[in-house]
Amino acid sequence: MNKTPIDSPDPIPTKAEILKYLEEAGEKITKRELARAFSVKGSDRIALKKRLREMEEDGVIARDSSKALRPAGHLPSVMVLEVSGTDAYGDVLMRPLNWRQEAPPPKIILATKGHRGTQTALGRGDRALARLSPGHDEVSYHATVIKVLEGAARQILGVYHGSDKGGRVIPVDKKNREELLIDADDAQNAKDGQLVLAELLPRHHDLKRGGRTLGLKPARIIEQHGDVSETRHISLIAIHQYGLPTAFSDAALAEAEAARPVSLEGDGYPREDLRAIPLITIDPSDARDHDDAVFAEADDDPENPGGWHIIIAIADVAHYVRPGSALDHDARLRGNSAYFPDRVVPMLPESLSTDLCSLKPGVDRACFAVHIWIDRHGVKRRHRFVRGLMRSVANIAYEDVQSAIDGAPTSVASPLLDDVLKPLYAAHDALDQARMARAPLDIQSDEKKILLDDAGEIVEIIPKTPLRAHRVIEDLMISANVCAAETLEAKHVPCMYRVHEEPALDKVEALREFLQSLDFNLARAQTLSPALFNKVLDRFRETPHAMLINQVVLRSQTQAYYSPDNKGHFGLALARYAHFTSPIRRYADLLVHRGLIKALGLGTDGLSDADFEEMGALGEAISLTERRAMAAERDSTDRYLAAFLAGRTGHSFKGRISGVARFGLFVTLMPSGGDGLVPVSSMGSDYYEFEEQNHALVGKRHGQVYRLGDIVEVRLIEAQPITGGLKLELIGEPNRDDAPGFKRSMDKGSRGKGSRGQTGRPGFKASPKKGGKKPGFSKAAKKGGKPKA
C-alpha cells in the first residue's frame, strides 16, 4: 500500500490530496490514520474533520460500517456481500452487507464461477466473502465468491398474516424487510396477527413447489407466541432482533449439571477459610444472582491509625468454567448477560448463575477475594488476592441498607447495623476522600425502572433513585478492579483492561462552542481531565438546565471498551482499570480471574495459551457483545414505553428536547422517559436549518429556535410497541422559562427578522444537506452512551 501523502505547506491536506491518498490506499483508512499520515495535530484536526464532512456531503468520499473512509462509489477489493435478488436478465445481484448510506449501493453481479472455478449457487439473503473486480456498462462490479458464509439467520421472529391455509411472516426486525412465504402445510394452524418464530427451509423446498430460488424465502412456523400486542413478547422481540443466544449447548448444560460445591482442600490448592467473616451481599431487590460480597473493619495496625481493612469477595466462576470447556465456549459466545424488565439472558446456565456461583446467604460458596488495606484518607496501602470459601450472612436490598443507616432498619438489616453496615459506610467515608481527590467524571444517570405485575403488564415507570448505598458498593468494586489491574501488570500477565479513552478534540471543541452560546467559557486545557468537565457540570448542577448539560457532556465522551492494551480509564481518572467483580455476567471478568490465577499460582485453571494468543480478538469480540446487549436492552425499554403509551394517542405531554437532527427533534416525555420523534415536516411553515454546534434547528424565515434542552408541549400521534417508536407533534412554542439563554451563531448567514414560528399544515422543510434520515422515522437513533465503569 502507498501510504506516502502528498507534501503540502498547508497543515490541512486539500480535498484532492485526501482523495488521491484514499484511492491509493490498499486497506481501510480511519480519520485518525489520515491525520497521522498528514501529520495533522492539535486543533488542526477539527479543520480536517470539517473538510472530510464537506467531502462526504459533496459525495466525494463515503464511510463504511466501521467508519473507515473511502472514495465514494468505490468498494474494497474483498468484502462480505449479500444476495439481494436478480435483474431483468436473470443475473444474481449482490449488495454490501449492512449498507448504511442513503444512496443506493453500486450494481454488483455475481459471477457464475467461484474463486477457484467452482459453481456458486446462492439464494436471496445468502452471504459470501467475495472478490470484486470492475464491471462495465451499467454494472459497477463483478463479484467472485471466495467463501460462502453462515450469515443469514435461519430462525426469524415475525408477525404472521394469513390463515391455516398459509400466508406470510413479516419480520419484527426493522432492518429486515423481506417477508417469508408460509405454505399451508407449514403454517401449524397459526392465526393472523400472532407473533411466531419461523425457520427458513432449504432451497429445494422452494423448487419442489415450483417457486423461484430468488423469490420469497420459504419457511415454516416452529413456535407460536400468541397475539403480538401482548406486553410479555416485548423482550422476546429484542432478543431475536439482536441475535442474543438463548439456548445453551447440551455439552455446556451437562457440565453445569455435573458441577459440585467446593471444599477447602478439594481443588488441589488450599482455599482461605472466610466463613467466620460476616460478608454480606447488597443488591437490587429483584436481583436474581449475587456475585459480590463485602466486609469492612477498622485496621488494627498501629501504624495505620484510622485506616480500614476491606474484603471484597467475588464468586469463583473460573473454578467451574475452565478454558476450552463447553461452558467456556458458550460463555464466550454470549460475552455477557443481558437484562430485561421481565427476564434475563444469562451468560451461564442457571444452575451456575443462580446457584453454585451465586453467593447465597447461609451456604458455603467458592470465592475469589481481595483484602485491601487503606489509610484514613482512602489511599491504598496494600492488597492481597486469595481463593477462598465463604458463607454470606445476609442479602440486603440497597433501599434497606440505606434505610438502616438513616435510622429505620428493617428486620433483616437491624442485626447487622452496628457490626457490618456502619463499618462499611465508615470505610467508604475514607474511600470517598480519595475519590474526590481523584475527581472522576460525575455524570448523572436518568435511568428509568419499569415495574411489571405478575402477568407481565406494565404497572408503573419510575426514575431510578441514586442512594448512598449504591455509591458505597460502586466504590468498593472500583477499588477491587484497580487492584486486579495492578497485580496483573506487576506480574507481567496479560490483562483485559476496561479502557475509556479521553474525548476526541473535535468533540471537545464542539462542546466548547455550545457552552459559549450559554455564556460559559470552557478553557482550552493542554491536558484533558475529568475535572475540566466536572467544572461544567457543577456550574449548572443546581439549575433547571442540569440535565441538558449532562447530556451534552455525555455526548462528548468516547465509548468504553475491552482491550489488552492499557490506555487508562478517563472517566474514572484511573491509570489502569480492569473488570474483576462480575464474572457471572461478564466474560471480561472471567479472563481477569484466570489471569490472577496464573499470576499468583492459585490453581491450574488460569489463562490458557489460547487465551494468551487471542486476547486482542477477545477484547474486540466482548466489546461487541456488550454493545449488542446494551442495544437490545435499550430497544426493549423503548418498546415497553411505547406499549405503556399506546392507549394515550392524541394526548398532550410535556417533554424535553433530547436530540436535534436535520430531519427533526427527539423529545423525551416527562415523566415516563419515552423518546419520540417530531419530524421537521410537522414543525410549521418555516424552513429549518440544522446548527450542529448549537444542537439546534433554526427557522430561516421567522427565526424560531428549537434546541437541545428546551421544554416543549407535544401531542402523541402514534405509538408502535412492535418497533418502540413514538411519533410526536409540537403544540405551540418552546418554553424558555427554565431553559438557558441561547446566542445563535452569527457566521451562518442571514436570519429572518421574526422571533416566533407559525403553525399549520406543513410541507417538508428540512435542510437540504445530505445524511439525514427521512421524516417520519419512528425511533431515535441514540448516539454514544454513558461510559460505564
Image (cartoon, grey):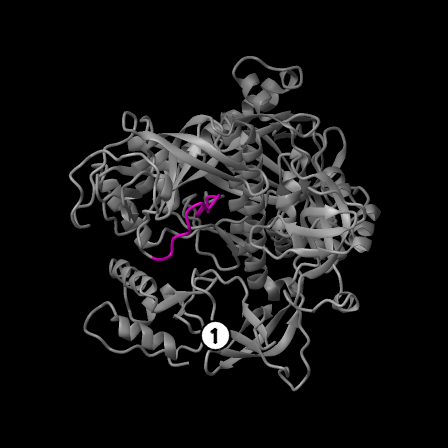
The N terminus is located in which quarter? bottom left
Residue numbers of the magenta segment = 770-784
- The answer to whether residue 389 is visible is yes
Residue 84 image position (x, y, % from top left): 58, 67
- Looking at the rendered structure, the secondary structure element under dot 1 is loop
* Identity of the residue drawn at 73% across and 41% down: 225
Indicate the quadrant where residue 356 lies.
top right
Considering only vertical position in the picture, is 372 above or below 165?
above
Q: Residue 446: tell me if it is visible.
A: no
Q: Nearer the viewer, residue 680 or 76?
A: 680
Q: Position of residue 558 (x, y in %)?
A: 41, 50
- State the image coordinates of residue 505 (x, y, percent, origin top left): 31, 54
- Residue 82, given in percent of the width and then of the height, sits at 59, 68
Q: Main secondary structure of the magenta part?
A: loop
Position of 173 relative to 303 (above/below): below
The amino acid type of the residue labelled 1 equals Pro
Left/right of residue 594 with respect to residue 327 in the rendered view: left
Q: Is residue 783 left or right of residue 365?
A: left
Residue with the mark numbered 1: 76
Q: Residue furthest top?
A: 408
Few, some or many C-alpha atoms within 10 Å of disc 1 (few <14, some 14-19, many ≥20)? some
Q: Quadrant of residue 606?
A: bottom right
